[in-house]
Amino acid sequence: MRKTQLFVLISVIGSAWLLSSCATTSPASAAAETPRITILYDAFGKDAAMTEDWGYAALVEINGKRILFDTGDDPAIFAKNVKAKGVDLTKLDFVVLSHRHGDHVSGVSYLLSENPKVKIYAPKDGLGGIFGSDITSKFYRKDEALSAEKRYYGGTPPEIIKLGTVFAGANIQLIDKTTELVPGITLIALVSDAPGTKELKELSLAINTADGLVLIVGCSHPGIEGIVAEAAKINPHVHFIAGGFHLVAAQDPAIEKIATTLHDTYKVDYIAPGHCTGEPTFAALQKTFGDHYLYAGLGTTLNLGANPHTASDRRASGVLDENDLRTYRTLIAQSDDRSEGGPEIVHLVQAK
């Protein structure tokens, strides 16, 4: 009898050990059981172990995947923040770089030092883009009357000319149009038409869930309304949006229009804005969405599901407190978004 009990005990322990071992064999299995988004880079927040800086990065754990969305503005700060949250960059399914601006991609050097072969999806920016590019050799005019030494490639160019990336050795796949990467996970590819960022391509991450569509945006240079309209083609029920809306210098009428459109037209369930959304827009969105507005400062973990919430609920205490506002204004004054925003943003940063 005692031998039988001992055998059963050993079998149970062995099975548990095997299960735990299997659970660490792939990045996907390392994803959190509760879908969640952790903010790793932004200019406001409450985690004293992390450094606030202008830029954006988030770890998205959802649908069995661990996805890094953008990498912030400074590799040292990105590294510090990643370590502060205990994030293992070697266990990623893939990375999304939303667009070419430095405050979203500068942490790639640290990422590659930790995970040099990770798959990175980035927008195809055309000839000479920082993520690399390729173009048909038909793009330039030929003159066959010239001697070979005066002609490109001696007069016999390759059919496709490949141009390099500033991220040497990175495993980058360029995305030129809206693409479903795996069932339920789509990259939305749009182009900005706004002054200062015309022709800039940007990727947004859309994940279909049982509760509706979860949408992560970097800077929304093509316009948050346009991105949500494209997302609604995947699933008209947009459940949750997080990230930067690029309304940091927008005037009140434009802000009110967008807040109303997101709430009333697209009927977005929950919203967790950050980065370049802007202080007046934070306030307007909280007023419009009420309890369905989630604070998303640096270090915040946003638990998703049917009723999204932050790990430490800040909704009742206001959008940003005085320390948040002071840091946010100081950092935006140093950012590229200030030069894009014009006199309105100068007035904003002077209100410290």
Image (cartoon, rainbow, N blue to C red):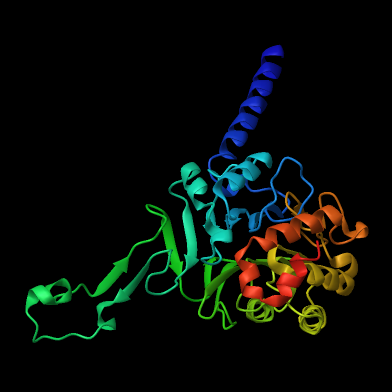
Q: Quadrant of the C terminus?
A: bottom right
Q: Is residue 129 above or below residue 71?
A: below
Q: Is residue 154 visible?
A: yes
Q: Is residue 108 left or right of residue 66?
A: left
Residue 250 drawn above or below residue 271? below
Quick check: can you spot residue 213? no
Query: What percent of the width, then of the height, locates residue 24?
Result: 57, 39
Quarter in which the N terminus is drawn:
top right
Q: Nearer the viewer, residue 346 or 327?
A: 346
Front residue of 224/53: it is 53
Q: Looking at this view, is 282 or 138 the one in front?
A: 282
Classify residue 220 by image quadrant. Answer: bottom right
The image shows residue 85 at horizontal and vertical percentages of 68, 42
Tell me residue 145's x, y (percent). Answer: 8, 87
Residue at image location 63% in from the left, 62% down from the top: 335
So how many labels did they put on this image?
0
In the drawing, does residue 260 fall left or right of residue 121? right
Residue at image position (87%, 75%) is 288
- Which residue is painted at 48% across and 45% down in the image? 115
Residue 51 in the image: above or below residue 141:
above
| Camera-nearest residue between 160 and 52 | 52
Q: Position of residue 19 (x, y in %)?
A: 61, 36
Q: Is residue 254 left or right of residue 193?
A: right
Kindly give the residue lying farthest to the right in the view shown: 316
Quadrant of the rendered image containing residue 137: bottom left
Residue at 70%, 76% in the rendered image: 343
